[in-house]
Every structure is written in structure tokens, then in C-alpha cells.
Image (spheres, rainbow, N blue to C red):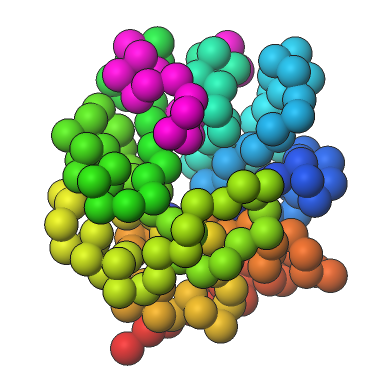
């Protein structure tokens, strides 16, 4: 797998049409976009993903949330799975060795287990309080994120309540990439916010 970009943008249908959101994210320079539509059926999600793929710039990666079958049918870069979704081993069997499989974790034990699985990255969070999940897991904080980054070998994608202001501290804790939803999609100018997020540095 090619290294993850520092910004892992998520086009969440809770904030509008995920196709239009993805287009704005790409316009700002995002080169990895996850399509997240928890309420869509397989047909609707497949159609949305295919439309996103049609407008994605060369070299951009599109990840499907939850649905390995949709990822396979659409021919996306891969799938992102949660703790209650299809097991990563099964997703890997479906998608083969070359596509991305990401996996969400929320504590040290889950992260260590994920490090032994056939996944390409370990998502960890929520780092800060988040409102994009109906029943969020307990906030883990920056100290636990740093512990996780030291404990596992796979790239860590930090997620949960990350903003432009907190992104430097998250990267400093060791995250390879930051997954952002609300701070991008709630912006009046999504593309501009993407550019600002990608310009984040830390000392």
C-alpha cells in the first residue's frame, strides 16, 4: 500500500450528498476520501461510490465505509471496517491482497489485536468528543493515542473530534494520518478548509 496521506477526509452523508461532498474534498486537494453513508442500501451506496469514482482526480483513493461488497463491485481502493462489521480476514479474502482494508479500534487491546490482522491501517479514537456517531465510544485522548502509536507497527489513523486547531497535537502524538469529518464538512468552504488542514505543521 502506498503511504496514507496525512489527511484522511470522510464524505459523510449526514452532512449532505456524499458525492457533492467528495467533489469538494477533492477540489481542496484531498487524495483519500472515505464514502460514509450509514443509512443507504447497497444499491444507493454503489451508485454514489461509482459517481465519486467518476469525478475523482488521477491517483486519488476512494474508500467505502462498512461494505466490502460495494468496494469490490465498484472497484474502489478499499474498505474501512468497524468493530461490528465484517471481520478484516473476510474482507481481505473478498478484496484480495492489493486493496486497502482499514479497521476501527477504541482501546489498547483492540489496537494490538488489529496489529496482527490483515489490515493496512488502524483507526483509533475518538481522540476528542465527537457528535458524528450516535453512540460514540469513550474519548481516548492524546496520551492514549501516543501509547497506541508506540505499541503497534501499522500506520495509525486518528479520528474523533479533530479540528484544524487540534490537528498539530494529534500528529505530534504519532498519528500517521488524521481522519476529519465535521471540521471539514461543516465549513462554509469545504475545499478551502481541506487546504488549510493539509497545511498543518507541528514542531
Q: Between residues 63 and 3, which one lies in front from this camera angle? A: 63
Quadrant position of the N terminus in the picture? top left
Q: Between residues 124 and 139, which one lies in front from this camera angle? A: 139
The residue located at (15%, 57%) in the rendering is 151
The residue located at (32%, 88%) in the rendering is 203
Question: Does the magenta segment cover residue 30?
Answer: no
149 vs 47: above or below: below
Q: Name the residue furthest bottom.
A: 203
46 vs 200: above or below: above
Q: Quadrant of residue 122?
A: top left
Q: Is residue 53 left or right of residue 71?
A: right
Q: Which residues are magenta?
A: 73-93
115 vs 169: above or below: above
| Residue 4 in sight here | no
Q: Between residues 35 and 62, which one lies in front from this camera angle? A: 35
Residue 59 image point, x, y percent: 50, 41
Residue 130 image point, x, y percent: 61, 62
Residue 36 image point, x, y percent: 65, 38
Question: Does the magenta segment cover residue 77?
Answer: yes
The residue located at (62%, 47%) in the rendering is 135
Q: Is residue 161 left or right of residue 168?
A: right
Residue 183 image point, x, y percent: 67, 68
The residue located at (40%, 64%) in the rendering is 140
Amino acid at each position: 500500500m502506498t503511504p496514507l496521506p496525512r489527511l484522511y477526509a470522510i464524505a459523510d452523508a449526514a452532512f449532505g450528498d456524499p458525492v457533492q461532498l467528495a467533489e469538494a474534498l477533492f477540489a481542496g486537494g484531498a487524495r483519500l476520501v472515505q464514502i460514509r453513508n450509514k443509512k443507504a442500501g447497497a444499491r444507493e451506496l454503489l451508485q454514489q461510490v461509482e459517481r465519486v469514482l467518476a469525478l475523482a482526480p488521477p491517483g486519488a483513493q476512494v474508500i467505502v465505509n462498512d461494505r466490502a461488497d460495494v468496494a469490490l463491485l465498484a472497484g474502489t481502493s478499499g474498505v474501512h471496517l468497524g468493530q461490528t462489521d465484517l471481520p478484516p480476514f473476510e474482507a481481505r479474502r473478498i478484496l484480495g491482497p492489493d486493496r486497502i482494508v482499514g479497521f476501527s479500534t477504541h482501546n489498547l487491546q483492540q489496537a494490538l489485536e488489529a496489529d496482527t490482522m490483515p489490515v493496512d491501517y488502524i483507526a483509533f479514537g475518538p481522540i476528542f468528543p465527537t457528535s458524528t456517531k450516535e453512540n460514540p465510544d469513550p474519548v481516548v485522548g492524546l496520551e492514549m493515542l501516543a501509547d497506541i502509536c508506540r505499541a503497534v507497527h501499522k500506520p495509525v489513523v486518528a479520528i474523533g473530534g479533530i479540528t484544524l486547531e487540534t490537528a498539530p497535537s494529534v500528529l505530534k502524538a504519532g498519528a500517521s494520518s488524521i481522519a476529519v469529518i465535521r471540521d471539514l464538512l461543516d465549513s462554509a468552504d469545504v475545499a478551502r478548509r481541506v487546504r488549510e488542514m493539509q497545511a498543518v505543521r507541528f514542531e
